[in-house]
Image: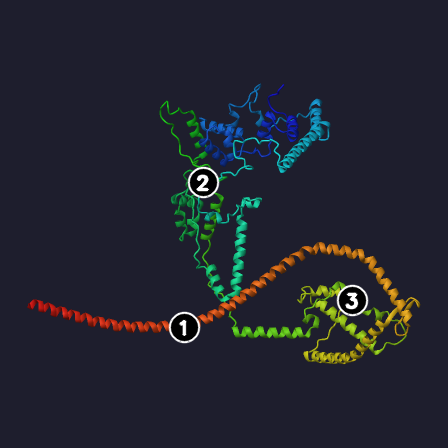
Amino acid sequence: MMKGGAWKNTEDEILKTGVMKYGKNEQNKARWNEWLDPSIVKTEWTREEDEKLLQWTKLMPSQWRTIAPNVGRTASQCLERYERLLDAACAKDGNFEAGDDPRKLHAGEFDPNAESRPARPDPVDMDQDKIEMLSEARARLANTRGKKAMRKAREKQLDEARRLAVLQKRRELKGAGISDGHKKRKRNGIDYNAEIPFEKQPPLGFYDVADERQIVEQLKFPTTVEELEGEKRCDKEARLRRQEAARNFILQRHNAPSATPQANKCNGPEADTKRAKLNLPTLQISEHELEHIAKFRLPSLSKELAEGSGATCDLLIDYVQTPCQGATSIRTPQRTPASKHDAIMIEAENQAKLKVSQTPLLGGENPELQHSDCMGVTPKKREIQASNILTPSVTSLLDLQVSIILQPIPQDNDEPEEKMEEDISDRIASEKAEDEAKMQDLHKRSEVLQRELPRPSPASLQLLKNSLLKTTVGNCSFVPPTLIEQADVMIKKELLSLLEHDILNYSNNGKVQKEKEDATRTAKENSGFLPLTDQFELDELKEADYYLMKECMEMSRESELFDKFVEEHKTRLNEMMYFTTRKGYNLSSVVGNLEKVTALQAEYENVRRWMDTNDKKVEKFEKRINLLTNGYLQRSRNLWSQIEATFKLLNNAETELKCFRALSNQEQLAALHRVSTLCGEVEKQKELEQTLQKRYGYVLSAQVRIQEEYAAKQLAL
């Protein structure tokens, strides 16, 4: 028994889980394609979609399955929207209401297209049998480990194993040269596995194969989403900016004098840049209307600007008292005014007229169609229209203009005092003096500040003080301290005072701290006293450095004896050996040879035992190193062979270059000799030609003379 009518929410839930497990068929398939598919757009129709629907309907009437993918909706949605547009266009009064649709179902009627309607919601007090049916269906459809599901999976696995076994059998028989008589099913189209598609057989006989010798590049098809979509505009602009910055950096680095004028030429105001065409909207108000509105907005402007007595002011016109034409329309609109014509309604009216018109075979007049903007498949770009002059933005502009006009005339004539510009030489001298003062101040500071070394933080100051002074504070013996100990205490105290002074007055980056008073107060609370450092002159500091260097030189002389002591200590350490018989260390020069042998044997056993314990670790590390470096070693060998071959080619090329240079030098010398020889022969040929020309002229003149004499004798006879 097949049900009909509206779908229920429980049926939709059962259908969703059923489609996920068993697939789609008939009503389930229709419900899925018309409503449950997540790719279906269920929002309100936009203006662009309406224009696209009307244009595609004009191109392909009644082909809703073809029109739907182009519009981005389902076929039923396109048909329903198209009929609604036609009904709205055919409405007599022009006020179409969606509730007055004649296709709306009444009580007792069945919806013929129930698959495209939203599901009926579940009642609050649903029947127990329906709840049990829904839960049972979900449990059954979610069961993938039951008998039936296991049987289906097992049958599918057996079919796949059977297919693979048949393929393996055919492959082995074919490899042995035995034909099993299996023939492939002949297809109507092209079998791309058995034949070459669109193959052209070459003509018989000899023909040119020059084109075939060229390497045919394989077409690279896009494989990722980025390649399919192409490079984005923002990425392309970023890449071009990086290229331009790199190009400018290289040009600035290699040729700075020419890079600066070029940058000024590109970035200067005289650069000829291509500007876009200025597209202004069409005017919606004339100049006369604009003046009229300005007068209406400025009722008291003429009174305030006029000069004269009170009687003259009383005679002026007050535009507030005069009613404005169409005063009811002078209100600030809540939105931008709509267009005077609706392209969608015009196109819908045209298609409604064409739908009810007769065929050309019956004759008659064609319906009068109005011009619409739907001239292509994509929606036409509408012109930008300016809003009304009474919108809040324009009103604010007029108020600003009025406030500027009503500003009083300035009365003060004070001129600002010009600042005297400092001379360049004075500025350079002052800067030089400041630099010298800074350098002198820097030389008076400690070596840590001069070298810009890091200083300890204020938090670690107390720890440093405790570590430096714990020996002096904790010394409770009755023995008086020596001079060296007293000097050591004085040096440590001076070091602490310098540390506190640098920490409290200078930060780690060498700049004076902004909150010096707070830091000083914190230091007093933590340490109990504020260090007072003496200010010394540069001469005194230099003298102290001299005495310090002198003492260091004297200490370096004493270090020579210390070096001898260190060398002697090293030799004694090398002679020290551990003897098992004595169970202790002793010099090898004092002990006999037998004890030395036993000591060396014991040391050898210890080394052997250590090697045995670490042998496995070494093997493990060797395997790991071989695993990590074998590829690099093989690659290095290949590269080394390539480098050797390249060096051989380089040596051969150098030899050939030397040979060709020698040939070039010899050819230059021989060419000069050949050129000079040929020039001499040319000169000789010229001289011979001149003598022959002279002889030819003489013979020619003699011939003419003889002919004249012969002619004269003939006349005489």
How many angstroms separate mark 3 from mark 1 (CA)?
A: 89 Å
Q: Tag 1 or tag 3, which sits nearer the N-term?
A: 3
Q: Nearer the viewer, mark 1 or mark 2?
A: 1
Disc 2 crowd, CA 10 A, few/some/many (<14, 14-19, 20+): few
Q: Residue at x 83, y 74 (%)?
A: 571
Which image quadrant: the N terminus? top right
Identify the amino acid type marked 3. Leu
- Residue 342 visible (yes or no): no
Which image quadrant: the C terminus? bottom left
Q: Is residue 555 left or right of residue 713?
A: right
Do callouts 3 and 1 mark residues in contact (Cβ within 8 Å)? no
Disc 3 crowd, CA 10 A, few/some/many (<14, 14-19, 20+): few
Do callouts 2 and 3 mark residues in contact (Cβ within 8 Å)? no
Q: Is residue 461 left or right of residue 106?
A: right
Classify mark 3: helix, strand or loop: helix
Do callouts 1 and 2 mark residues in contact (Cβ within 8 Å)? no
Percent coordinates x, y for residue 604 in the rendering: 85, 64
Classify mark 2: helix, strand or loop: loop
Numbered circle sitting on residue 382: 2
Numbered circle sitting on residue 672: 1
Identify the amino acid type marked 1. Leu
How many angstroms separate mark 1 from mark 2 (CA)?
A: 82 Å
Q: Is residue 403 above or below residue 673?
A: above
> Which residue is disc 3 drawn over?
464
Identify the amino acid type marked 2. Arg
